[in-house]
Image: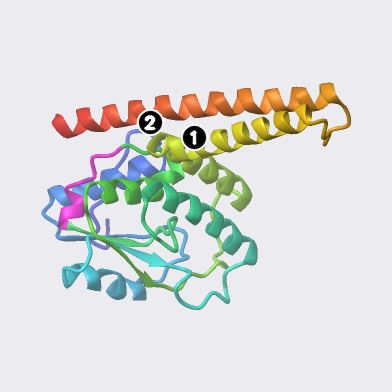
Amino acid sequence: MKAGARVIRMPKNGGKAKALITGLREAELSGCNIAVMLDGDGQHSTKDIEAVIRPVISGEADLVIGSRFLGEQSGIPRYRIFGQKVINSLSNVSSKVDVSDSQSGMRALSRRALRNLNFSSEGYNVESDMITHFVEMGLTITEVPIYVRYDVPNGHKEGATSMGMKLLGNVVSMIGYKRPLLLFGVPGAMASLVGVLIAMLTVSNIYLFGSFIAQALVGVALFMIGSFFVVSGLTLNSLTLMMRSLHSNS
């Protein structure tokens, strides 16, 4: 406050997503044309703000993500690179857009992006949810390289493994909601086909699992489980299409 900053006080701790969206919405209400968000643990450099806002100023993008993986990666721990690649791949499947750093906390939002913050999110999944929502709204997303340091004195209060598992679970849940046929239908169809193949081998007296009974049980089990997944995927896909139709008509 002494430095001239406008401070928004939250009545209670609602988590990162709620605090972040509250701040961005306040920026939109105050007439802000470009808003920059960055993590508060000191990992990001304010020198990268100019690069992050440049595509917004030129009108090239509505959301600019500062990517840790477009530039030099020498300072990033290998386990973080591996974990982020897994989460990025799943997040890209959910949002149907190719992003190299879906969890980056340094971003710039245009006026149009600030007007489209009407999505719900919880915890540290807000970055992925923001990408998915903006893609559905037809907003343009791009990335620029940024520098990140991991030797900050006051790092994240939650361990990287714990946070990574939570993010992974949230992203998988998002895929199930956005693309249920991909998450349930495809594996289910494959399991059903394998079950049918095993059944055909059993009838032909070709045993892969030791005995007729064991192999027959495996084949039937795979077919039933696969069929359940396929039906679940089709049902959830129908519900998703219905919800999208209701949302577009409202």
Q: Report whether 192 appears left or right of 245.
A: right
Q: Residues within 10 Å of mark 2 (few under 14, many from 20)?
A: many
Secondary element under disc 1, as helix, strand or loop, is helix
Q: Residue at x 44, y 61 (%)?
A: 101
Q: Position of residue 184 (x, y in %)?
A: 51, 34
Give the residue displayed 24% in from the left and 45% down from the top.
117
Give how far across and how far down residue 217 sits, in percent: 76, 22
Q: Is residue 34 something that shows in the picture?
A: yes
Q: Which residue is mark 1?
A: 185
Residue 246, compared with residue 79, is above or below; it is above
Residue 215 lies, with reference to residue 179, above or below; the image says above
Number of marks present in the image shown: 2
Is-magenta flag for residue 125? Answer: no
SS class of the residue under badge 2?
Answer: helix
Instruction: Point out residue 147 in the picture as x, y percentages from the top left corner.
Output: 45, 73
Seen from the viewer's position, the closer of residues 170 and 43 is: 170
Using the rendered image of the protein, determine whether residue 8 is visible from the camera's viewpoint.
no
Tell me the tag on residue 237. Answer: 2
Instruction: Give the residue drawn at x 33%, y 61%.
Output: 107
The three-letter code of the residue at mark 1 reads: Gly
Write down the region rendered in magenta: 111-119
Which is nearer the eye, 234 or 153? 234
On the image, the x and y values in percent for residue 156 come to 54, 53
